[in-house]
Amino acid sequence: MADTALVIMARYPQIGTIKTRLARALGNEKTVQLYRAFLTDLAHKFAGHPAYDLHWAYTPAESDYAAFMAELAPSLVRLMQFVPQEGNELGERLHNAFRSTYAQGYERTVLIGSDSPQIGADAITDASRALDKADVALGPAEDGGYYMIAMHRPHNVFQGIPMSTNAVLRMTVELAQRQGLEVSLQETLFDVDELPDLERLALLLRADASLAPVTAAILAAMK
């Protein structure tokens, strides 16, 4: 077991339940196809990395996520672990994901969403290294939230934070600091939530498809 867990918060891609804002522009079937590509790229990028173990925290809990990922990345599924998300609110589910990896004995946990397939392995390494001095490392998203959070211990920096607002990052930093925690801010990235975000991702991947090759191919075919 590595000393660091990388947890990806993800959904089972059912029509009508994922990326609803994007689906209004693309249609449900294309959105599901695109999200499957996101997950495939993330699996190939992070499974089997020597510095951390890859965990998928998935929802809905009743889905067979291991079988689903075996379909997307059959050669890599043995290098992944799977745990259902627990909790009614997103903040509660995030906190429980940290509690789960801490209980398993991991010294550090880096948690990311599944909406930024362009994220690089360096971002994970940098967040883990930031914990040498900080208690919490946050990767700011351009919309005012964060795409990544890393901690040694499952500090509750989620309670009372209104998720999916442009105040999430600021309020999380303030909550952490009120608890006496040192916060380190990492590289800023963008999430793919709406059509302009997707167009921006497509432009990025046209310049460098290696960032997310399966997603790049899907986007090229959607032209």
Image: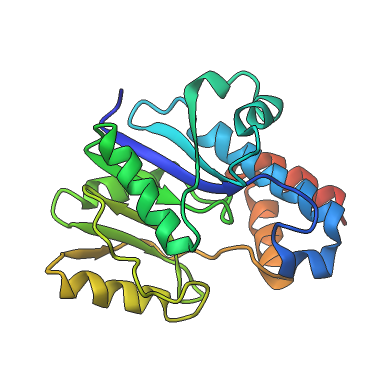
- The quarter of the picture where residue 157 lies is bottom left
196 is higher (above) or lower (below) than 17: below
- The quarter of the picture where residue 95 lies is bottom left
* Quadrant, the C terminus: bottom right
Closer to the camera in the image, 124 or 162: 162
Closer to the camera in the image, 166 or 16: 16
Q: Looking at the picture, how far across and down is residue 176, in whole percent?
A: 22, 69
Q: Residue at x 45, y 71 (%)?
A: 145
Q: Looking at the picture, how far across and down is residue 118, in whole percent?
A: 56, 51
Q: Looking at the picture, how far across and down is residue 4, in whole percent?
A: 30, 36
109 is higher (above) or lower (below) than 20: above
Closer to the camera in the image, 82 or 113: 82
Q: Would you say 145 lies left or right of 212 here?
A: left
* Quadrant, the N terminus: top left
Q: Looking at the picture, how far across and down is residue 109, in whole percent?
A: 31, 44
* Residue 190 visible somewhere in the drawing: yes
Closer to the camera in the image, 120 or 53: 53
Q: Residue at x 22, y 65 (%)?
A: 183
* Residue 123 visible somewhere in the drawing: no
